[in-house]
Image: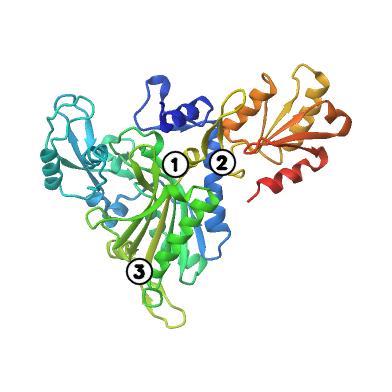
């Protein structure tokens, strides 16, 4: 039996959601490109996130900082020293792997769930030796000693070798918000509590296992830094508030099944160097069970304090009423957009038995679907039907993302649209020519109703918009 992940991966490429990166040159491991349908779904998720967490709120301010920043940013944040993974090499086949993933996958196969991220090199080696964990590629048990590797991608600024200076691609998007904290204070005069929001690409030089777009070298994040006065607000209350907001976004907006979700607190060993408390919102993936979808961290005043100390610039907030100056603390909700995309595909994928043939359907929320509607002429070789269908298509296209399909029989067209998540299919038949109406088929129920053409845009928008 083909597993769900294999089916999703196949569907994603075949229908234009996700393509392997640099495929015509043999590919590049852990890189992917979004195709015509994938870019629409990803953009819908990102735009919806921005609308929900930024546009609808008065206490959040948006930013878009650079991918390349001064190396001093990463030194001050601790990333040049602490942003590391433990890697290990197989002496026989020369494959390199993250040691924590090697151990965790070993125990998953034994039906046990453990987390060893953040363990010392010595502890990692002890577990591998005790369990005699073999290489997953060649099955040999012949490892190098585990070593720490920094995850930041290095690059260089300048043309001439002698004058080139080292820089880094950003390993997270949070630092761009911290270093612009004073700029926002000076330009917007916000009152605490308030947040900064950013959405964009980050890069990590990781050795990863497959699992499609779950972990890649380049990935999309959407993130909030929510600043507050620790003397006036308990961080625990804000932490709980954002847990509820993240849960609401995932279950109500994206429509993810609650049964596939759980919260898990980080152990002291795996928690990042800047965090006093971190919890992950995990999803039950087809590979290895529950794994991180989103993260929520209480970063205290770690980042602003370090940037203030290293830069010499005063990053304190001034309370206009009391004139007290202090460094705000931060609660940080982080949302992986690529993982949101993957979870939307996984959670909406259904196979249903039909009378004549089975169908695959993506039951995406209508406002997330790449195409909101598809227009068909009942018969592609009847000029009058095609002409009328083109008129309807032309009317809908400026209002809603709409597909056109006149290939094959009508049943196959319905199933082709079900497979990519299109919520409504509109058929122009001979009655349409007489009555100026169309047949609208619902993706999830397959039921059909007739709607007047002049009322069609309004009808669809009422069904689709959040």
SS state under label 1 = helix
Residue under the point 71% across and 48% down: 462
Please provide percent x and percent y for residue 168. Answer: 32, 44
Q: Which mark is residue 314?
A: 3
Distance of label 3 from label 1 (alpha carbons): 36 Å
Residue underneath mark 2: 364
Asked if residue 103 lies left or right of residue 175, the reply is: left
Distance of label 1 from label 2 (alpha carbons): 16 Å
Say which quarter of the image contains residue 101.
Answer: top left
Q: In front of the other: label 3 or label 2? A: 2
Residue reaching furthest to the right: 434
Task: Identify the mark nearer the N-term, 3 or 2.
Answer: 3
Cβ atoms at labels 3 and 1 below 8 Å apart: no
Cβ atoms at labels 1 and 2 below 8 Å apart: no
Residue under the point 50% across and 65% down: 187
SS state under label 2 = loop
Distance of label 3 from label 2 (alpha carbons): 47 Å
Residue underneath mark 1: 338
Q: In front of the other: label 3 or label 1? A: 1
Nearer to me, 334 or 463: 463
Asked if residue 387 lies left or right of residue 256, the reply is: right
* Crowd class of label 1 (few under 14; some 14 to 19; many from 20; radius 10 Å): many
Q: Which mark is residue 95?
A: none
Task: Identify the mark nearer the N-term, 3 or 1.
Answer: 3
Nearer to me, 363 or 215: 363
* Crowd class of label 3 (few under 14; some 14 to 19; many from 20; radius 10 Å): some
Residue under the point 65% across and 25% down: 413
* Crowd class of label 2 (few under 14; some 14 to 19; many from 20; radius 10 Å): many
Nearer to me, 267 or 59: 267
Eyeballing the image, is 310 above or below 109? below
Does the rendering let one see residue 14? yes
């Amino acid at each position: 039996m083909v597993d769900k992940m294999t089916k999703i991966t196949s569907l994603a490429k075949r229908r234009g959601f996700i393509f392997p990166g640099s495929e015509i040159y043999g590919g590049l491991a852990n890189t992917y490109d979004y195709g015509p349908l994938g870019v629409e779904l990803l953009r819908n998720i990102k735009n919806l996130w921005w609308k929900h967490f930024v546009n609808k709120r008065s206490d959040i301010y948006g930013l878009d900082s650079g991918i390349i920043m001064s190396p001093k940013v990463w030194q001050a944040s601790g990333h040049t020293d602490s942003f590391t993974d433990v890697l290990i090499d197989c002496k026989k086949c020369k494959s390199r792997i993250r040691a924590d993933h090697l151990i965790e996958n070993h125990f998953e196969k034994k039906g046990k769930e453990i987390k060893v991220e953040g363990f010392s090199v010595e502890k990692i080696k002890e577990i591998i030796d005790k369990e005699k964990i073999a290489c997953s590629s060649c099955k040999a048990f012949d490892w190098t000693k585990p070593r720490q590797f920094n995850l930041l991608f290095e690059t260089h600024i300048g043309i001439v070798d002698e004058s080139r200076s080292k820089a880094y691609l950003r390993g997270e998007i949070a630092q761009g918000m911290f270093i612009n904290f004073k700029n926002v204070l000076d330009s917007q005069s916000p009152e605490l509590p308030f947040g900064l929001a950013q959405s964009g690409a980050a890069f990590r030089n990781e050795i990863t296992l497959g699992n499609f777009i779950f972990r890649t070298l380049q990935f999309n994040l959407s993130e909030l830094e929510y600043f507050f006065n620790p003397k006036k607000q308990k961080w625990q209350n804000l932490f709980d508030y954002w847990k509820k907001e993240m849960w609401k976004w995932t279950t109500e907006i994206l429509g993810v099944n609650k049964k596939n979700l759980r919260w898990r607190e980080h152990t002291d060993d795996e928690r990042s160097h800047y965090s006093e408390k971190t919890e992950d919102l995990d999803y039950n993936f087809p590979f290895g069970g529950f794994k991180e979808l989103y993260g929520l961290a209480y970063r205290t005043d770690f980042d602003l304090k370090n940037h203030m100390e290293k830069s010499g610039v005063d990053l304190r907030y001034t309370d206009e009423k009391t004139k007290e100056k202090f460094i705000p603390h931060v609660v940080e909700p982080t949302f992986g957009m690529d993982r949101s995309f993957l979870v939307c595909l996984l959670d909406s994928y259904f196979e249903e038995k039909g009378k004549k043939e089975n169908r695959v359907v993506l039951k995406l929320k209508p406002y997330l679907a790449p195409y909101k509607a598809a227009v068909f002429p009942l018969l592609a070789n009847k000029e009058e039907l095609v002409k009328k269908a083109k008129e309807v298509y032309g009317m809908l296209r400026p209002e809603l993302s709409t597909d056109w399909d006149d290939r094959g029989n009508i049943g196959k067209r319905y199933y082709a649209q079900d497979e990519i998540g299109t919520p409504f299919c509109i058929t122009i038949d001979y009655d349409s020519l007489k009555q100026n109406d169309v047949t609208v088929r619902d993706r999830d129920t397959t039921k059909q109703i007739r709607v007047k053409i002049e009322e069609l845009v309004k009808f669809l928008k009422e069904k689709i918009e959040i």
